[in-house]
Image (cartoon, helix red, strand yellow):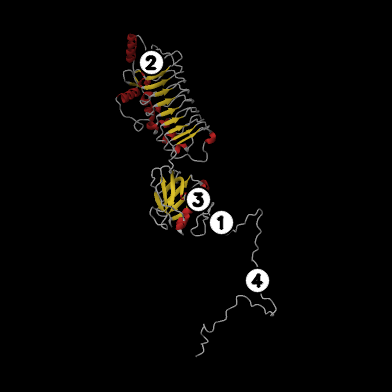
Amino acid sequence: MSPPCPLTPAMSPAPPRPLTPPAPSVSPHTAVPSAPPRPPSPRPRRPPPAGGARSRCRRCAPRRAGNASLPSLPSFPFPSRPGAFPPALPRAGRTAAMRLQCEVEVVSRLLPSCGLRGRGRGTRALLSLGRPPGGARGGSVYLMVCTARDRGGARYKVQENVERFFTRFVEEGKATVRLREPAVDICLSKANASNLKNFLSAVRLAHQGTNISALPLSALVPAKTSEVEKPKTKMIITSKRDYPLTKNFPYSLEHLQASYCKLARIDTRVLCLKKLRKLDLSHNHIKQLPATIGDLVFLQELNLHDNHLESFSSALCNSTLQKSLQFLDLSQNKIKALPIQFCQLRGLVNLKLDDNELIRLPFKIGQLDHLRFLSAARNKLPFLPSDFRKLCLENLDLFGNPFEQPNPLVPNIQLKIPLTLLECAARATINYRLPYGCHLLPSHLCEDLEVAKTCQCGAACLSSFVQITVTMNLHHVAHTVVLVDNMGGTEAPIVCYFCSLDCYSEFLDDVYLQGSCDY
């Protein structure tokens, strides 16, 4: 038998390098320990704090705390163990963490925004995180947004599709999830801060795709009607302490009442509620109306009862309120006169002007052909305009006005003989219905043509006329009439105009034959 080769490793192993220094030689009578002594700890252990509470290592603190609180960008204290669900969420509520009620706005990043940011026009929605129906347990995870109009929901893939999380204002219930495909930002607002943190933690874990099967995700199903909150359409505020100063009004509001709030002016946030139909700002201290109220294209009712208004802006009469406004309450203010353009609010049905300082009604009030309810009690009206006889009302209240006693035999003659060229041109323009406007005539001439008087013969007169006041029974223009005075009268003086002495003479002849000056 040949001797083994000295170079064979199996037959001549190299002596192993000792890991520890060799033990010193001892005598046969010396006791040898069975195991080497444990080396001393390089860092002494800190004593436990008072009260028996255990201290936490800085490295282990995020792992133990989980996702109990989300700080601002850029860090996100998610669990470091792959597939672990945030321990801040209780076991019984893990399924609830996959659903979140808040306002959602999906903004596309591909459309040009011109440097403008959204105004928070979110829609109340239900967010669900799960797998599509019939999908495998370890398949892709989707985020579904269900609204009241679309309960089926829009789905967005989450796994390896989230570009960034914006959580600076997560404590206020706001966050944004930026997706890669499609290039949209899912903006969340008005959510419960605790639920929002847990929901974002689950979205983050689904995005990382590490052990997705560990997430207790169910199949995505359309939301029920009871689960999706409908947009808030009505808000009533009746005290100053309840008025929101730090929160915005819901963009979906259609009816807003802010009474007894001591408002000195109309809040600009109210003027951004484009869906508003009824605005009640009664019992405040408002002195002036902004022209931007006319931007509320759907506004039908405007209640400004008991304020400090001294005028009504003519800009509002030229806005979209001409067609939309149906109810207007200006009672208990300090208005002395309404502008000439007021009668362009052709859609008015109910008009309240009680307890003001009105010395006259709008000159062309007869153009309000949809007006059915008119109340102008307790003002300073000496007479009614001539166009008043064109109204067709259901209810009329003119109580408490100092009406003058009519006297048709004492006319106010403003005739100019011969007629000026301006008077002739103005009469021809109106009588022949010639078109005119600021692009054809100076603006002051257009204003004069708008206040032209109408004679009994149907002709127009501008600055050359004969004016008298006659008595008119208010039942001729209204079905129900509130008594004008305490004597039970339902008659009031009305102004009449005549374009010439001939027309005035014919009127006197008719009065003489009828034996009465009633109109």
Residue named by callout 4: 37
Residue named by callout 3: 92
User: What is the x, y in percent for residue 445?
Assistant: 37, 27
Sequence-earlier tag: 1 or 2: 1
Residue named by callout 1: 64
Closer to us: mark 1 or mark 3? 3
Image label count: 4
Quadrant occupied by the C terminus: top left
Closer to us: mark 3 or mark 4? 3
Residue in the foreground of this view, choosing between 250 and 130: 130
Pointers 2 and 3 in contact (CB under 8 A)? no
Residue 364 visible to an observer of this rendering: no
Sequence-earlier tag: 3 or 4: 4
User: What is the x, y in percent for residue 111?
Assistant: 39, 49
Residue in the foreground of this view, choosing between 361 and 101: 101
User: What is the x, y in percent for residue 243?
Assistant: 52, 36
Q: Which mark is residue 473?
A: 2
Question: Which element is circle 4 on?
Answer: loop
Sequence-earlier tag: 4 or 1: 4
